Image (cartoon, grey):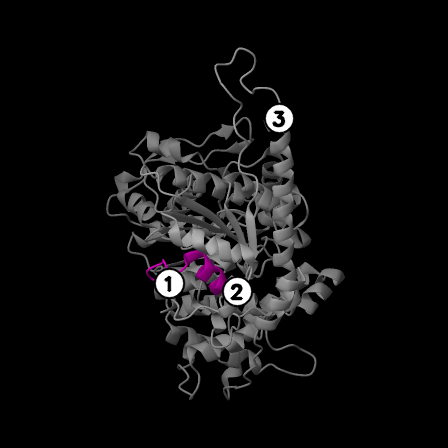
Amino acid sequence: MSWARSRLCSTLSLAAVSARGATTEGAARRGMSAWPAPQEPGMEYQDAVRTLNTLQTNASYLEQVKRQRSDPQAQLEAMEMYLARSGLQVEDLNRLNIIHVTGTKGKGSTCAFTERILRNYGLKTGFFSSPHMVQVRERIRINGKPISPELFTKHFWCLYNQLEEFKDDSHVSMPSYFRFLTLMAFHVFLQEKVDLAVVEVGIGGAFDCTNIIRKPVVCGVSSLGIDHTSLLGDTVEKIAWQKGGIFKPGVPAFTVVQPEGPLAVLRDRAQQIGCPLYLCPPLEALEEVGLPLSLGLEGAHQRSNAALALQLAHCWLERQDHQDSHPTDIQELKVSRPSIRWQLPLAPVFRPTPHMRRGLRDTVWPGRTQILQRGPLTWYLDGAHTTSSVQACVHWYRQSLERSKRTDGGSEVHILLFNSTGDRDSAALLKLLQPCQFDYAVFCPNVTEVSSIGNADQQNFTVTLDQVLLRCLQHQQHWNGLAEKQASSNLWSSCGPDPAGPGSLLLAPHPPQPTRTSSLVFSCISHALLWISQGRDPIFQPQSLPRNLLNHPTANSGASILREAAAIHVLVTGSLHLVGGVLKLLDPSMSQ
């Protein structure tokens, strides 16, 4: 433990930058639509991102907030204040025709499906999501594409300068990182005159800063589970109460099948608020009245997200009286009816239009059940970070392995690359991953390089160096402990009676399963990928290897195995930020 920590302490650097205090004279009382793009020297994209990063809440302040349990309602009121200071009123957001989506698992994928479907109708779409994979501008999309560095820079400085005008002794002029980006997204969408905006909730729902939206067109709740317990509560029912906070009077809302407890909470919340809440029928029901649906995102769990997306898109089109070129293609073939088990009306079953079918098929959402095939290496990328999403990830990964099974008998190596952050139970997540029988488990912080200087999109000031170091070492200890328990269990089972029972035709008991996974901790993502790929990834080809990369005996012996393997399968999971860092290195086009 001391070796890994001392090595990481000596190499890892999180750079701090100073805030830019530039202001625009007379901008304080003007709407942003009147602002020209600033042309001041040095106001490049990376400058904007570095200044944005200074709004990240530092780790010590986060701890203070948790202790004080500050009034969440006051946080929403503060968001409305910042919106007004930026030159907008809450009522202005109604012009965006918003689809507001929350959930624990799959809310981002649901949004991606929904946006792609509606874009197929010729609509100009806005899409606000979090977190980003590689560049922060990915969070704000127009017609499915991240806004350009130039557009991001323009809107960032307009908003930053506007808010800076209100700086005084008694008020903090700048909102926090996520609030700022939410405000910026609203301004971008209004100025770009989108036909609709798909807005993904950040955390929770009731007190999330996106919940200043008063009149969305439709709301959605994807699968619920345990996450962000320090903020949302330690039971699924408490979390469901938070998620149901996005419901609005008279605005239709849809959800997928949930456990009875949290679904009952959603139902009660909807009744109290006066929101008509519907339960989505499974995708199979829509396929029964049409053709099988092909999804652009892999994994059985994506079918639930696609079913929710179809209902959200269908409802939006109906409420906006959108004239489809083939209106008869949308047919409500079964009327809404109460579900006896759930006491919720079922959403309509309809035949998806060609636009809807193509939208589901063409959806791309990086870092979610994504596979990159690179020579002998296959990278399986999924940002699963809750127990339910990791279970779905394991199912998808094992099915993918089964489909790619080699028939030539060549040697294969299976590697887990993992990190987990926040208050998540990493031991529970790792236990779910253990049945995959990895040969190596690799842990590293969510930083691409040992120094993040010059890479503002990947900087994170919300955690300290000691925290990320100790967290990775704890993951390794949890994993090794699980391996020890499994080894003991297999030892006893191998000494027991023949598993086939008396009279079996087996000549000997089944050999015990592999029990020991070698584990390693690296100081950053690039070092982990260097060791895993051993120069065999045709795209990830660094110019030089760190001298001490193979100092550890396990790293040295494993390098020989990796260089000779016929196939290397790498599952990257546990954190969307980790997956984003890996994508940045494996897919340089995402940084362009």
Q: Earlier in the sequence, mark 3 or mark 2?
A: 3
Q: Residues within 10 Å of mark 2 (few under 14, many from 20)?
A: many
Closer to the camera in the image, 264 or 531: 531
Closer to the camera in the image, 9 or 46: 9
At horizontal 71% and vertical 64% (from top left) the residue drawn is: 63
Q: Quadrant of the N terminus?
A: bottom right
Closer to the camera in the image, 268 or 281: 281
In the rendered structure, does residue 235 fall within the stretch colored magenta?
Answer: no
Q: Earlier in the sequence, mark 3 or mark 1?
A: 3
Q: Position of residue 381 (x, y in %)?
A: 44, 51
Q: Looking at the picture, does residue 418 appear above or below residue 392?
A: below
What residue is shown with label 1?
A: 540
Q: Position of residue 229 (x, y in %)?
A: 66, 50
Q: Residues within 10 Å of mark 3 (few under 14, many from 20)?
A: few
The span from disc 2 to disc 1 (Cα, nearest Å) is 15 Å
Q: Amino acid at mark 3?
A: Cys
The span from disc 3 to disc 2 (Cα, nearest Å) is 42 Å
Q: Secondary structure at mark 1?
A: loop
Q: Nearer the viewer, mark 3 or mark 2?
A: 3
Q: Which span of residues is magenta-colored?
A: 525-539
Residue 420 shows up from this direction = yes
Q: Amino acid at mark 2?
A: Cys
Overall secondary structure of the magenta stretch?
helix
Q: Nearer the viewer, mark 3 or mark 1?
A: 3
Q: Looking at the picture, does residue 549 appear above or below residue 340?
A: below
Disc assigned to residue 524:
2
At horizontal 52% and vertical 64% (from top left) the residue drawn is: 524
The span from disc 3 to disc 1 (Cα, nearest Å) is 46 Å
What residue is shown with label 3?
A: 495
